[in-house]
Image: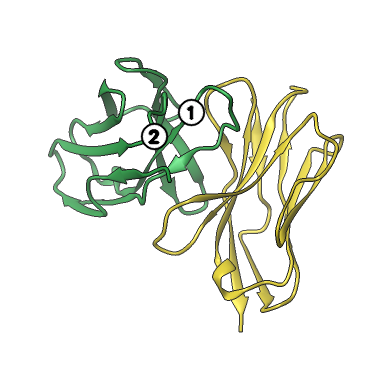
Chain colours: A yellow, B green
Amino acid sequence: AQTVTQSQPEMSVQEAETVTLSCTYDTSESDYYLFWYKQPPSRQMILVIRQEAYKQQNATENRFSVNFQKAAKSFSLKISDSQLGDAAMYFCAYKDSNYQLIWGAGTKLIIKP
Amino acid sequence: DVKVTQSSRYLVKRTGEKVFLECVQDMDHENMFWYRQDPGLGLRLIYFSYDVKMKEKGDIPEGYSVSREKKERFSLILESASTNQTSMYLCASSPTLGTSYEQYFGPGTRLTVT
C-alpha cells in the first residue's frame, strides 16, 4: 500500500529566510501525482503546489518550489523569503489512479518575526 | 471561485446522539470526500462519492455512513456518536475530467462528543 511520510512534525524559520519541508512516499506505481497543501490556523486547506511524476522538471509557484526525486521517492517543499502568512500546517499528499489521496501526518511551520 | 461549505464550524453532541454533518459545493464536481483530521495522523478518508447515490468506503468508515442524494451535497452521519469520534471533520470536492485532481476543502467542523 502507498504511504506518505513527513518526518518533521514541526519546523521554524526566521522571516525572510528559506525553509525546506521533507516528504517521502512509497509506491510501486510509475504514474502518479504529488501535492503540497497548506492549512493556516482556523482556515481552509488550500493547494500550494502539484507535481506530476512523469514530468522531470520541478514545479514552482512563486516563492514555493519542490525538489522531486523520483528514484528516491522524495518530494520536498522549499519556501523562499518566508513570510508571516506562511505559518500553517503543511501536508504532503500522493495520488495515483485511485480516487483518493494518501496524506502525510503534516508539518507545522512556525515563522519567527 | 470554488466554494465548499460545511453546515457548522463547531458542534457539541452527547454520546449516543445521531449527528449529521452537511457539505455543499457549488462547482458541479463529481467527487466528494469526507475526512477526519487528528493531530499527528494527518487526514484519514472516511467515505467518498464519485457520483450521485454512489459511495465508497475509505480507510475508517466504521461508525459512519454517508448520503449523496444531489450532486452538490454530501452528508456524513454518525449513527450513534461516541467520544472517540471527537475530531475535526473536513469535506472536500474535486472534478473528474481534465484534471489536476486538486481537492477543494470546506472550513471544517470541529465536533466534540461528551
Residue A102, percent from left and from top: 58, 34
The chain letter for the residue carrying disc 2 is: B
Say which element carries label 2. loop
Check if mark 1 and mark 2 are on a common chain. yes
What amino acid is found at the position of numbered circle 1 in the picture?
Pro
Question: Which is nearer the eye, B31 or A106?
Answer: B31
What amino acid is found at the position of numbered circle 2 in the picture?
Met
Image height check: is A17 above or below B80?
A: below
Image height check: is B85 above or below B57?
A: below
Give the distance between the C-alpha atoms of the residues marked 1 and 2, in whole angstroms.
8 Å
Numbered tag placed on residue B95 in the rendering: 1
At 23% from the left and 34% from the top, the residue drawn is: B78
Residue B25, percent from left and from top: 34, 37
At 26% from the left and 54% from the top, the residue drawn is: B9
Name which of mark 1 and mark 2 comes first in the sequence. 2
Snapshot quadrant of residue B3:
top left
Residue A109, percent from left and from top: 60, 66
Is residue B88 rendered to the left or right of residue A60? left
Is residue A21 rendered to the left or right of residue A100? right
Q: Does any portion of residue B33 appear in the rendered image?
A: yes
Is residue B16 rendered to the left or right of residue A102? left
Question: Which is nearer the eye, B85 or A46?
Answer: A46
Say which element carries label 1. loop
Numbered tag placed on residue A105 in the rendering: none
Is residue B29 rendered to the left or right of residue A66? left
Snapshot quadrant of residue A33:
top right
Question: Which is nearer the eye, A108 or B69?
Answer: B69
- Farthest residue toward the bottom? A113
- Farthest residue toward the front? B1
For label 1, the crowd category at 10 Å Cα-Cα, with few meaning under 14, some 14 to 19 and many 20 or more, is some
Residue B81, percent from left and from top: 20, 39
Q: Are marks 1 and 2 in contact (CB under 8 Å)?
A: yes
